[in-house]
Amino acid sequence: MVLDKLLAVDALIFLASAGTSLASMRKRRIEASYETRAESIFFAGLVLLALIGVGLAFAIN
């Protein structure tokens, strides 16, 4: 099933979001670009998770 593979990709997207957010907190200067990227990546992960959830709802009979 392709949905389980999409969930694995989604987990990597959330991991990238967490890593980017951590990088923005580690900088001594405030790096708004890292935080903006982290928010964008996180939002993309949420959208993908919602789409997978809808796909699972229709795939289960």
Image (spheres, rainbow, N blue to C red):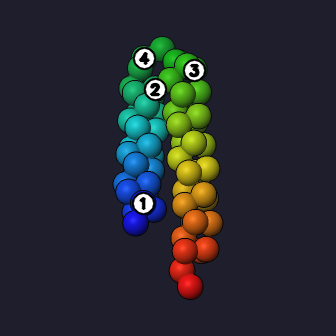
> Which percent across, then down, holds residue 34?
50, 23
Do the numbered discs 3 and 2 sit on residues whose CB atoms are within 8 Å? no
Give how far apart the Cα atoms at labels 2 and 1 are: 33 Å
Q: CA distance from mark 3 to mark 1?
A: 36 Å
Cα distance between the residues tagged 3 and 2 = 8 Å
Determine whether the residue tagged by mark 2 lies in a helix, strand or loop: helix
Residue 37 position (above or below residue 57): above
Mark with earlier residue (2, 1): 1
Amino acid carrying mark 1 in the image: Val
Q: Secondary structure at mark 4?
A: loop
Amino acid type, callout 3? Ala
Place residue 22 in its image quadrant: top left
Instruction: Measure the C-alpha gap from mark 4 to mark 3.
Output: 12 Å
Q: Residue at x 45, y 62 (%)?
A: 3
- Is the residue marked by circle 3 packed among few (<14), some (14-19), or many (20+) residues within 10 Å? few
Asked whether disc 4 touches disc 3, contact meaning CB atoms under 8 Å apart, the reply is: no
Picture residue at 61% right of the left edge, 59% below the top: 50
| Residue under numbered circle 2 | 24
Mark 4 vs mark 1: in front: 1
Q: Which residue is the site of mark 4?
A: 28
Q: Compared to 22, does 51 lie above or below?
A: below
Residue 42 occupies quadrant = top right
Of the residues under marks 3 and 2, which one precedes in the sequence? 2
Judging by the rendered image, the residue that carries numbered circle 1 is 2
Give the CA separation, mark 4 to mark 1: 42 Å
Circle 3 is placed at which residue position? 32
Examine the rendering and report whether any part of residue 55 can be seen.
yes
Of 46 and 9, the residue lying toward us? 9
